[in-house]
Amino acid sequence: MKIRINYAYAYLGLFLVFSINLKGQESAQMKISDAAADNRVAAQMQAAETTAAELEVVTLAEPATWVSVSSLGERNLILRKIAPIPTPQAPLIVQTSAERTAFSAEQMRRFKEAQVSDTVQLRLSATVYGEDYTELTLSIEDEQFTIWSNLDYSYLPFLGDFQTDTRSYTYTGFNYRIDPEKEQTKAAWAKSRGYEYPSQWKEPPVRFTSKEPEYVIVTEDNRTVPPEVYRQLDDLMSFYLNRFDALKLASENAAKLQAAQERYDAANPKAPEDIVLNFTRVREAPK
């Protein structure tokens, strides 16, 4: 099998500034302390408990014509049949022709921008080896392409949606991390018990030309790489490097919140609670 390697380079000095939508990660713009994480988790859990208690009151307030209780081990499933709920009729809204055509200048501008910007699904999985290399798998239609980069893509899960001048990207994918020290520990543990551990560690198929961020597309035989592959990779790398510090901060804050959640759960163990469900048939309201 012949391996053909296609090079493409993206240097830090040429990166463009793109807008970003981190899906509600505004809080990631500031570093949070352990104490702040504990306070945030405690407030969220208390709010959730209050909402759950209110929902239970509303649920049990409905008169039941039939009740079934099933054991689920440490908790029960309680099904309650209640009276039919009428479906409200939507009000009829009549618009005049003037109202239907009265678009503001801002609405027209956004409409025109939407026509120019293409929506692209960025389907990408990443395996990060230590902090040095990443193996990417990019899926475009029914084809997959393997890419190696000397950039640490550990923070891809916080990428969200992002835009360029002509495109809107929506990222979906998986992210894995292979730690060399953990791999060595696993291998030593396996050897001490008389068998060999198949290490998941990999090395890039080529040497990168410099310390600057770059990527290498590895293809089999004489497979042609479509221009779309380069375009998506260039847009991704440019945006990722431009927002690298913010994405790293979002990852660190998420780790602190996860640790705070674990501390809260350990300090506030909850007994299993019954599950109560109301059900009924739906009927239309009388006209």
Image (cartoon, rainbow, N blue to C red):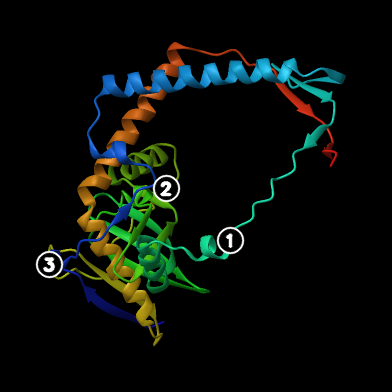
Above or below — where is 82 with respect to 156?
above
Q: Which mark is residue 268?
A: none
The part of the image, by quadrant, that contains residue 287 is: top right
Q: Residue at x 28, y 22 (%)?
A: 36
Q: Nearer the viewer, residue 102 or 239?
A: 102
Rendered location of residue 79, percent (x, y)? 80, 24
**Most distant residue in the right direction:** 65
Q: Residue at x 80, y 35 (%)?
A: 86
Check disc 3 and report the residue beneath it: 210
Residues under labels 1 and 2: Cα distance? 73 Å
Q: Is residue 46 left or right of residue 244?
A: right
Q: Residue at x 36, y 69 (%)?
A: 167
Three-letter amino acid code at disc 3?
Ser
Name the N-terminal-most of marks 3 and 2.
2
Above or below — where is 275 with respect to 156?
above
Label 1 environment density (alpha carbons within 10 Å; few <14, some 14–19, many ≥20) = few
Q: Nearer the viewer, residue 140 or 201?
A: 140
Three-letter amino acid code at disc 2?
Tyr
Residue 262 in view, yes or no: no
Check disc 2 and report the residue beneath it: 197
The part of the image, by quadrant, that contains residue 88 is: top right
Above or below — where is 204 with respect to 186?
below
Name the N-terminal-most of marks 1 and 2.
1
The part of the image, by quadrant, that contains residue 259 is: top left
Above or below — where is 75 with respect to 217?
above
Check disc 1 and report the residue beneath it: 96
Q: Secondary structure at mark 1?
A: loop
Residues under labels 3 and 2: Cα distance? 33 Å
Front: mark 3 or 1: 1
Task: Work out which quarter of the rendered image holds the N terminus and state it.
Answer: bottom left
